[in-house]
Amino acid sequence: MGKCLAVEGGNQSNNWIMVDSDGEEDEDPKNAWLYLHENDIVAILNQLQMAEVFKHVLLMTSNPDGSPRYDCHQTSEPLFLKLLAFCTCFVDILGCGLQTYNLPRYKQLNKRIGRMIRMTVQYVSDHWENFLELNKRRLSQEQLGRLQLEYNSFFQRCTNTILSAEKLGSWQFMTDMPYSTVSKETMWLLLWSMHQGRGQKVTPLNTPTEEECRRFVADPESKLQLADVINLLPTSEVIFLLTALANMAQCRKAEETEFIEAVAFGLFEICYVCSQTREACSKVGRELLVSVANAHPFILSLLVQGTKDNMDTIGSMALYLFQALPFYQWIPCEPDITVLKQWLMSSDLTQPQNQLTRHVLGQLNWGVDQKTKRLFLPYEIHKQIAVLLTEAFGKFITNRNMGFYITESFKQLASAMKQQQTNEQVFNMWAWNVALKLHLHQSSFPSADIALANISGGVPVLANDNSLLPIMKGLKEKNSMASYMSLVISRFGHTDADFLGEGLDQLVILTENYHYLPALHVIRYTAPLFVNKPQALIQSDKFLKVVLLLLSADESFMKSAKSLWSHDFPGPITENFANMILNQACGVDGVETDSSYQLQMLTLWIQVLTKQPKWYQDKNACYILDQMVEMGFSTDEGMAMLQSAFKEAFVSHYKESQQQGGVASFVSWVSSGVTSIPVLSLTEKLSAPQQFGWLSYLILDMETKAEESTQLWPCLRTEMANDQKQNLDQALKKCAIKLKLEFAPSLNSLAIYQWSKLAVTMEMDHPLLLLVWQKFFVLFLGRQVSQTTMQQRASIGEKFFESSKHSGDLKKMKKRLGETADFHMKYYSDDSPDSTAGQKYVPDKDFHLSLSRMYQTLQLWVQEPMLHDSKLYLPALPQQYQADRLLQLFQNQKEPWMEFVDMNRIKHEIKVCSGTWTDHVTSSSGQRRGEMSRKPDSSATERILGRLSHHEPGKELPVLQPLKALVPDISTAILDEKAATLHLLKSDLNNLKEYAKSFHMRVVKHVALDEEFCRLYSQLYYNKSKQVKVTIECKSILNPLHKCSNPAVVNLNVQEKAFDEIIQRQTDENRAEYKQLMIEGLSPPPLSVCIAAVHVENAITMLVKLARRTTDDGRLVRYTDIACTLFFLLAEMINDDIEFYPPTRQFYTACIDMLGKEFIEKDPSQTEIVLQFSLNSPAMSGLMSPHFVPINNPHTYVTMYERLVQILQQQNPDLVFMLLTKFEIDQWLQTRSPAPIEVKRFVDILATGLYSCGIDPDSKHGMVFEIYCKHLRAVLVHNFPQNLNYVLNLVLNGTAEQKIHPKCWQILHTHCFYSREGENTLKETDIGSDISTDQTKQCLSTIGCFFLQLRTSSPDLGSFGLYPSTTLYTSHITEVIQDLMISFINKVLPTLQDSSPAQVLDLIWQTLIMSYAAWIQPLQTETSPLLPWIQADCEAGKKMVESFVFVIQYLHQIFHDLIPPYQPDPLIRVWLYFCDVLCSKQVPAHVTNVYNMGFAQLPWEQLKPNTQVLNTMMQLKDQNCPESFDLLAHVVCQLNWTDIVIHYSQCYGRQGTSQVLACVLLLLVQCYGDQKHVEIPNLEKKTLIAEKYDWSALTSDNYRHASNWFLQTCDPRCVMAERSSSSALGLRLLKAASGFNVQSSLSWSSDLSLKRQCYVHSVVQLMCQCTFEADVNLDTVSLILMNLLTEVETVTSSITDTRIQEEESLDLSKEIFALLNNCNPENNSVSIVMTTIIQWLQSSPRSILLMPCVRVASRCLASHKHIVNIVEECIHVYFKGGMDQVAGGGWDHVLAAMQIPDLNIEDFLQTALDEGTFLLLYGYIVQKLPLCQQLLEEQALIGRLLNWITVAKPLQEDESKLLLLWYKSLELILRQLDYGGNHAAIIKMLSSLVTSLHLMGEDRASGGLLGAIGLGKRSSLSPEFRISCRALAAMITLQVYDEMRLRLQPGQSLASNGATKQEVGALLSMKSNKLYQSYKNEIELLCDVVQNENYGLRQTLNLIHQISEMFYKEKEYLSILHSAHRQ
């Protein structure tokens, strides 16, 4: 760091600053080296014997055993003052130490000093405490006061000394100073001092008085001052300071209330009120306030009041504080209760105040003070809280209907669903928890409190006590809490009458609302009221209902919670129920009652429980009864009392069995002649009898006694003994008949079977299990004597187990007894302690031993047949058979073996269960938690003596050991003789060698032992087959009450672990040998081995020194010879043993290294020897290679190198690498200057080495390859580029053979080129090289020719290209070729001054193509070209093309300004090279795409294409591969076509302009043929510019060519795109090029017309193609067609010459109408097109296209329907637009344009008639009239007309057109009359016309059946038309007299016949028809005309005219009627 400072020159900003953990500067770096280490100072400090010092000053002596003896009597007042003086000086010294070592590096030292100060104060304080206690009566108060003052001063000085230490951890020792011995005044002063902060020195002058300290502490500003002090302190110091304050308060007596409250309130404000310190101090403040509150609980009132005053500031942190405070020690006063009540009732459940109150009330100690044996809290507080809970419950729960949600009974469910609990549910749980803790019932009071309660008025009456009004109100509101409180507070639960009258109702409310645990509490208090009169309770249905609900509580609860967890039996309610009963029986407050009371209570509950229906099937009832039986068993005469209590249940069971015996049992027993009814054993009906052992034992014992009392069992034994052949069933029936039993058990219900079953299934550790076995063996082995004088008979127990059903029971019993014996024996052999306090009861192990032995005896009994022999001699039995007990059994003695019953355990279990009710239900455990188990304070004397024993003793001085040399010196004379020297050293070396061998053998043996141990250990245990019986009970998911009658027994084959003792012995022997071997291995080497090593080392060292000192060459040669011989001797001696042992390996290596450096490396003659030794001994090459220096022998340098290369080919790379590293090639080349032939030889050898490493050297050859690369680099660098050709040929040949690593290309590239602008240049063209121009060209030629020849050398390379075989080299070859070309271009550039740029460019271009041809150019063959790469190598080809393009870019950059525009510059050359060579027709896409991507990077915007380039561009699509156009599209979008067009127009005139415009149009159009080209960014821009060109010079042929390309390639949807979109630009360009606009019409030409026709044709064709697309919107097609027609109209209208206009209109219309012929016929596109044309015609009434459309439609359309509709609409629109009024207009104009097709004319006319095109039909008639030469021909036309009129079904909008047909038909008929036509024929024609008119004039259709009766369909024709029909029909009929006569002249009478009357009548009827009222005037006018006799047949034409004028005046096509009438 000092050097850094010197270099920086005083720049202080860069200095390092050492900081401590608090971020402050650690120490002065300049003086840091002066300071002692902390460990040293601590060690020195520890050498001070502080224990001896304090023994001396405390006048302590030693006891005989050496322990210190302390006696305060020896201290007088002066001596105590001397002690204070000494300790003051000592503390001052320690204080100086704190100041002296006030550095962070001495932090631990400062802590030790602080601890010593504290220890000193503790010694003095303890001594002062003893002195004061001893002399408080001897000395006067003045003397003691003076001493106290001195002690106070000493204490204060010590405290100030610690306070003066800064941030070094000493303050922690201030925290546990003995503040209890200091006076009160000093405590106030200390408190004031700690408020002052660091650095404040307290002197007598500035010491305040006690009163000033009090005022200071009480001042709020002092808290702020303390807060400021805390903010300036580190966190650790803050903790120490606050802890000291807390300990000050904690150590003081409770009388110092003011001081304690001042400290506590100060801590509270600092840690929770002050915003500056709250966050940092809240956690530690919580712990400190807890400690103070534990010592002085009264401060909790202060904290509650303080929290109330600062609640807005503290908030939720108050809850954090209160959760830790010891409220269980607090007795709240009235103000505190008021605050808590206010918080609970006036705040919401979610607010902190409410939560605080709940926490405080939940933590209060509601139990009994164990010291005073009274309630810890007064009863009045219990009562107040009960009322408060009732009010709160009513407010938060009852009023919100939440009482049933979660009760205390559902604690488990609540905990499982804790995440889903609502605030109300949490409050509900808390309320019941607190309520159940309250001691409200007098039976829960201690005796002292009961007396006090009786004195104060006894049990309150609910209605009379005003304080209980909230409970009364709650009862009215069905408040469950009020129900509970009324039972435990008032007389409802204290007297039997009140309880039965009012209390039971409230108890029912509790249970019905699921408050089971509160109900149990109530029952706990009230049931003892009925001990002496149980019938009142037993006969109460309400109480029985409550009990039933309690018994079923767990079932319903678990059923609802079964989805949450799997529960154990018993449930919580049942368990608490049982514990409550036991607690009742045990008495109150742990006072044990007499056994009579217990039995009375148990009897009461037995009677209550057995009153429940089918109680024996209820597991919960059985569990409770089982617990009670256990308690009864523990009392005298308990079982008898309980059996008498069960007697009623027993009798009712038999009665129930009699009623439920069933028909089957009755029939079976009657048929067998038995009068008694079989009854199942009550034990069999029990739910899981083995689970309830006590109950089962009781019931089964009663049943056994019943068998004996009815003489059934003795009778059965007699029967079986008398007739052993009969079966048991028969014997049982006989006995039942003989004894005339009303009830008899079934065979399987016999007691002997029930006892055996119970014994097998009971738990092994059940206390009654042995008595159960005793009961069984009494029956099994018991014998009977019929007469006193007869001998005893044998037992018949075996007979009961001979049946098939019970044959296996004895084996099961034997097995069970064995397992039970093992169980107890295992417990006996367990090493666990005999008992654990407070946990499960553990009996004496001897008791388990006796049980195990007894079960072993029973196991012998169970299957011993001789025990059933009457001749058995008991004394002859072995001892383990216990003959005395067998005798008892034989004699049927039934006295229980109580010595095998652990009565202590039974009493313990009863006590635990009873205590569980007290602990867990009433939460007395929480109360006991408050009673802190404080260790008794030790005396001051004990503290002094204990402190002395903890001082660290000083360390003793170490002992010095003398040393002597063990290795003898070596004489120099020996070293002069080679043989002597070697002989001397060989013995030492052999010694080392032998020891290494022994070590190696030892390790090998060690490994072998471990392997053998691992093998043996895996065989130590093995699996042993064993069969196990498993019982499986059935369980029902659907029915939770289902019970398993008998579990299934399944035999399982299991594999049991077994131990192999033989293997264990082998492993023990193995480990013993292993330990012996470890002892040998850990022992140090023999001294002889160490001496030998040192001796050899000394000899070699002397040899080196002698060789260095000698000046005699002969002696030096001798020394060298000895050393070399010794060198190789050491190397040869090294073997596996020496290598394995690290010390020998290191020793031999060091010796060889020393000899090699001093002798071998300096002797050239040793070089080849070392090499040969290394080659012969490869394992030693690591030691030999450092001493191999080949440069010392230059004559064999290359030869040695070649030997190593040959060795590498034999696959020994490690050896070669080590030796190759010794060849310094650059040094050899520079210093030895070898001949070129030698260098070439070396390069050839090096090539062999490189090739042997392969293309990808493995890990073995990798390092050797790096050495070769280093050597290759050295050859290349030496006299560069002298050896370049050698290296280049090496690399090329290696590449061709694929044997060389790509790194060689990197080496070649790195040393051939350098950057001319520096190392950091980014320009790849700024490349320099020391290679000459010719040599550069030669290198390029060599590379190009080499790879071109290589590519054609084999078919594979020709087919697949060079890339597959040169994949790894391609990138490097690319770099080399590219940089060579750049270098070549840079070197050729200076020759531009002597040659023309074109010549130079030719030279460079040839070289460039030659260099890259092999890599990028397809090679032409006779069949197909050889591709440069396959598809898989496209990426590699892309890189090569990019390199090629990069060179061209650089070339273009140079020659851009040198070559004139439109001359062969680099861009033109590369384009022609691309078109002519690279992308022929046969080149596939994957190759062309690479060209496209690469060449696209060229600056094509600078291309100036000549005519050759333009021609190649236009022919590219036809002559080259399709993918090549991608590049052309890119180029087209880059070129500046505007300048090109201008250039060609200026240089080549119109012809050149036409050529370039054709090229531009064709290329742009071709670009729009592919979507990927459309997306080229500049295409849109170029197209928009091209639109503005003058396209007049473009020929129609070129345009047609372009448009045909467009139609073939483009997306037809472009015609539907928006005009401004990119998709429509191609079509817009075609439109612009075609001159399809108004401006072009001004200079019209035939070419222009053809181009327009081509354009419209293209648009129409695109529309046709669109109709065949599936997803095309045909509405868009309609819109396009509409626009096209409009554009055609506009363009043609702009032509001034009408003839040309008409011709072009015809041509363009013809193209448009082709759409109808060519669009998709399968969809509705035809109809849409047709509709669009009609709509356009309708919207263009004066269009010049109307007649051309008529003409085109008539001639060009294929569909008759289309023709007739279009022609009809054109005629209609023609007249509608008034075109007939124009000169030359009218029907003649229309008829001239209309042409009826000659073929299929009848079909055409029929189509026209079907379509209602009456105008066309009229035109057809008009056209045909001039062709008629005779009347018959006209008559034929009339017939056709009349037929059309008859058949016509006009629509309302077309009906007026029929007037033309009427008119023309009447006109022709009149012509028939005029020219002498036949009247009959004429009349027939008129009749036909009238008939048609009549039908059309009907209001309803007259056809069909409905029409005949006048119900035909209403006419669709208009009223006007029907009026017209009737009028004309009437007028015609009035002109016809009959079939032969006509009314020809006006004035003649009108015809009057039936037809006339009908038609005229029809006309006249219209006047009165409501439908025609609006036409009344017109009808009257027509009637006048029709009936006018002055009008004749000719006037019918006038009538038609009038009709047209009257009704159809707006129909323009009827104008001919008007004009005809005018004529």
Image (spheres, helix red, strand yellow):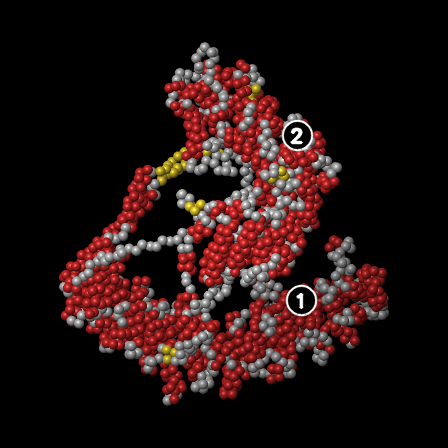
- Residue hosting label 1: 1808
- Number of other residues with Cα within 10 Å of mark 2, as a class: few under 14, some 14 to 19, many 20 or more: some
- Give the CA distance from mark 2 to mark 1: 119 Å
Seen in the image, is 1951 located left or right of residue 1618? right
Q: Are marks 2 and 1 in contact (CB under 8 Å)?
A: no
Secondary structure of residue under mark 2: helix
Identified at 73% across, 72% down, the residue is: 2013
- Residue 1242, given in percent of the width and then of the height, sits at 25, 72
Residue type marked 2: Leu
Question: Which image quarter is the C terminus in?
Answer: bottom right
Q: How many numbered marks have been drawn onto this rendered protein structure?
A: 2
Identified at 34% across, 76% down, the residue is: 1311
Vertical placement of residue 355 versus 1396, above or below: above
Indicate which disc residue 1167 carries.
none
Identified at 62% across, 71% down, the residue is: 1680
Give 476 or 1420, whichever is nearer the viewer.
Answer: 476
Give 1248 or 215, whichever is nearer the viewer.
Answer: 215
- Residue 764, given in percent of the width and then of the height, sits at 47, 31
- Residue 458, given in percent of the width and then of the height, sits at 70, 34
Farthest residue in the top direction? 789
- Residue hosting label 2: 529
Residue type marked 1: Ala
Give 1202 or 1386, whichever is nearer the viewer.
Answer: 1202
